[in-house]
Structure formats: structure tokens, C-alpha cells
Image (cartoon, rainbow, N blue to C red):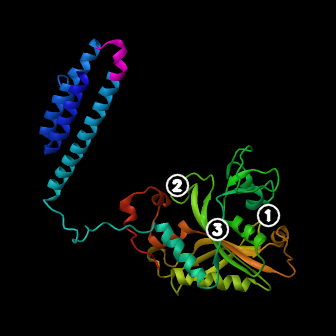
Amino acid sequence: MIKGKLDEIVSEVKEYAPNLNNRADFDVYKSTISGPKGKLTEIMKLMGSVPKEEKPEMGKAINLAKQSIQDTFSKVIKSIEENELLGQLGSSIDPTLPSPELEKGHLHPISQVRDTIVGLFSRIGFAVAEGTELETEYYCFDALNIPADHPARDMQDSYFMPKTSSVSNVAKKSDERYLLRTHTSSVQIRTLLEEKPPIRIVAPGRCFRRDTPDATHSANFHQIEGLYVDRKVTLTDLKATLDHFVREIFGVSAKTRLRPSFFPFTEPSFEMDFYSPDLGKLSNQWIEIMGCGMVDPKVFESVGLDSDIYSGFAFGIGIERIAMILQGVDDIRNYYQNDIRFLRQFPDSIA
């Protein structure tokens, strides 16, 4: 008797429910079937009077009926929801109409400047080289002639990983630590070990140092390192290359000067300043923008190159430094706050 009533309810639902065309009527009808006083609910209450040996079969029949009814209700409510959506959009949709205008995004201001600098050096023969942001002490320090007692290797300056760390795609040369690279000079070493001169590369990428964030410092920043190694590369080649870079970026009236400095991986080493009459309030001020120099013979020795045959120059440019000058930004932290009001001020490339 119970099974017959279940079949009747299932048949009724399959016949009647698809004719419902609004949510209110659907909810009312659904309550008459599966509500507290619904037909299916009343039958389920009869299970208490079913003999023990018949309960498994009756329970299975009720579950099958419930599933069939639920499937029908699901199809009906989906149809009702689609009709409601069509009602909100209009009685019909013309697929030939153009899609609504979507706001177009653009490159981040730092990415714009990076691409401009990379493009500039690409046009004069420099290839782009990339490396991992997680490095070992050998590539970041040892091969660059940075001794073990150098301040850059102190925990205050670098983000070191625990000694138990293991990274499958960054091989260690000895019992050394991993760290987040402090400069992209590590890419220069990897390139010198993998390729033979002549080598002419720029290595853009993100770097990390334990700086306290302020208007001109960030623990995360971007850098472009340059390297040129060949026979008879001279300081004149370095100066000419950087002069070309400055004039292309800051205008043909820009001038440069080199001041003696010290870096473990170059000898002689220089800080390079520039000034340009085309920079508004910064016009005619000497502004420091990069470090550079001739590759130290000890660096060549560490990668197996004969410094009596080969020479080269290297330089490092802070991308944020260039971007702040070009875009008139006075606080480096603005680049990392994801404030759309700030980012919308730089919709196009500077090139």
C-alpha cells in the first residue's frame, strides 16, 4: 500500500510541477509534497507501523521516491530562475549587439619602466637573462668576490632561509645557506658559467633586503643588472653605453658623471650621477642613479675565465629609482599599496 502511494506522488510531481512558472507557486506546491504536512512526509510517518522485516524494502522505496521528486523540483526551480533572469534582462537578448565596454587594465608603473629600459638595451644588442629569486650564498656572494665578513652577508641585510631548507631546482655548491637574492648580479654569475664570451645581457628582476620601509627604501624592490664581457672591453665602452641609456631615458640634454666608489665585484668602481634640464623641479640637480664599474678579475677567476684575455663592465639600476624620477613619485611605498587611484595616473608606457 505504501509503495503504491509513493508511485502516485512521484507521478503527480512529474506531471504537475513542470507547469509551475513562478517561485511563489512552486514554494506552495512543494510544501504540499515535502512540507511538514506534505504527502511524502505523511507517508514517511507510516514507517513506524511497517513490520520489521519489511522496513528495509520500504525504506529503499521511500528514498528512491524522494530522489526522483527532488530531481524534478531541481529542474523546475532552475527553469524558474532562468525565466526570472530573462525578465530582468528583457524579454529577449540580441546576440548581435556589441558587448558592454569593459574597463581596460594596463601595466603597473614599475613594469612600464622596466620594459622601457629592457627595450632600450635590447636595441643595442643586450639579451635578457633571468634567474631564480631564491639563491645560494655562492651565486649571491662568493662568486662576486664578496667575502664572508662583508656586511651584506649579515642577517640584518639579507633574508636567509633556515639551514635545513632544501630546494630541488636551486643546487648548492657546498654547505651553504639559501637566501632571497639581494641583487640580480647572481644572474650574471649563472650566465658566465653557462655561456662563453662575448656576453651582453641585462637581468631584470625582484630583489630583497632587510630595509626599513620609508619614502625611498623598501624590503622588496626591482633591479636591472647589465653585463658586457668580451675581448678588449674598456671603461670608454661603459661610459658610452650609460650615456646612451641616460639620454634615451631622460632626454638628449642629459649629462652624466662618474664618481669613484667601491664594489667587491668591480674594479674600478663608480657611482653614476646625471642631470637633465628637462625634469622640472629636478632640473640641473645631480642625481645618483646607479653603481657600475669594470668586472673585477677575481670574478672572472671564480667562473673560469682568463682576465688577461677577457674584460668587461657591469652596472646595476634600481627600477623604482628611475620610475620615481620619470613619474614624479615622491614615496616608493605608493607603488606597492595597490591603490587604483594612484595606478590610474600612469595608463601608458613612458616610451
Q: Residue 310: x and y, percent?
A: 82, 80
Which label belongs to residue 130? 3
Tell me the CA gap for discs 1 and 2: 31 Å
Q: Is residue 52 magenta?
A: yes
Disc 3 residue type (three-letter): Glu
Name the disc covering residue 214, or none.
2
Q: Secondary structure at mark 2?
A: loop
**Mark 1: secondary structure:** helix
Relative to 44, residue 209 above or below: below
What percent of the width, then of the height, locates residue 342? 39, 62
Q: Is residue 5 left or right of residue 304?
A: left
- SS at circle 3: loop
Instruction: Give percent across and percent down for residue 125.
Output: 64, 84
Measure how far apart labels 3 and 2 are at the Cα level: 28 Å
Q: Is residue 295 above or below residue 53?
A: below
Q: Earlier in the sequence, mark 1 or mark 2?
A: 1
Q: Earlier in the sequence, mark 3 or mark 2?
A: 3
Q: Are marks 1 and 2 in contact (CB under 8 Å)?
A: no
